[in-house]
Amino acid sequence: MGLAADPGVAKLSVSDYAQLGSLAEYLHLAVPDVRVTRSPGHSERGEQGALDVLVIAADSTVLAAVIKVLPEFLRSRKPGVTVTATVEKKRRKLTVTVTAKDAEDARQVVEKFLDE
């Protein structure tokens, strides 16, 4: 079974907020079919304010491609920078934090989620 063409949404945040714009530019270059929108983040109950996130609405193939290119972006940044991806599809949600070291594991988890 391959990745389905059903639409999904991914919200990306970066541990170093100053890198959010760089991540958006990188995704435009690395995944030509991606449409990235910067959106205000939503604070959880008891929190004051929230930082912007990148929102990607696309089919599963494009979302998987986005996750696949994150390791290269992370390797080009200072050590310790992470990207947290929240992927939503068919009323289900998965959140993973991707580092340069565990990116392959994160990619496999997201692809399996998108394929279900």
Image: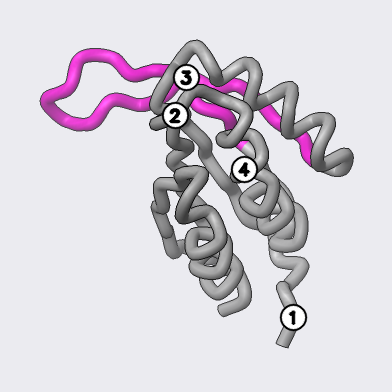
Percent across and percent down for residue 67 are 62, 51
Q: Earlier in the sequence, mark 4 or mark 2?
A: 4
Q: Label 4: state its secondary structure.
A: helix
Residue under the point 59% across and 35% down: 75
Side (left or right) of 5 relative to 71: right
Q: Earlier in the sequence, mark 2 or mark 3?
A: 3
Side (left or right) of 100 relative to 2: left
Q: Label 2: state its secondary structure.
A: loop
Residue under the point 65% across and 18% down: 22
Residue matched to label 1? 2
**Mark 1: which amino acid?**
Gly
Q: Earlier in the sequence, mark 4 or mark 1?
A: 1
Closer-to-camera residue (66/92): 66
Residue matched to label 4? 70
Q: Nearer the viewer, mark 4 or mark 2?
A: 2
Q: Nearer the viewer, mark 4 or mark 3?
A: 4
Q: Earlier in the sequence, mark 1 or mark 2?
A: 1
**Mark 4: which amino acid?**
Leu
Closer-to-camera residue (75/48): 75
Residue matched to label 3? 52
Q: Quadrant of the N terminus?
A: bottom right
Predominant secondary structure in magenta? loop
Which label is found at residue 79?
2
Q: Which residues are magenta?
A: 34-55
**Mark 2: which amino acid?**
Pro
Q: CA distance from mark 2 to mark 3?
A: 22 Å
Residue under the point 56% across and 35% down: 74
Q: Label 3: state its secondary structure.
A: loop
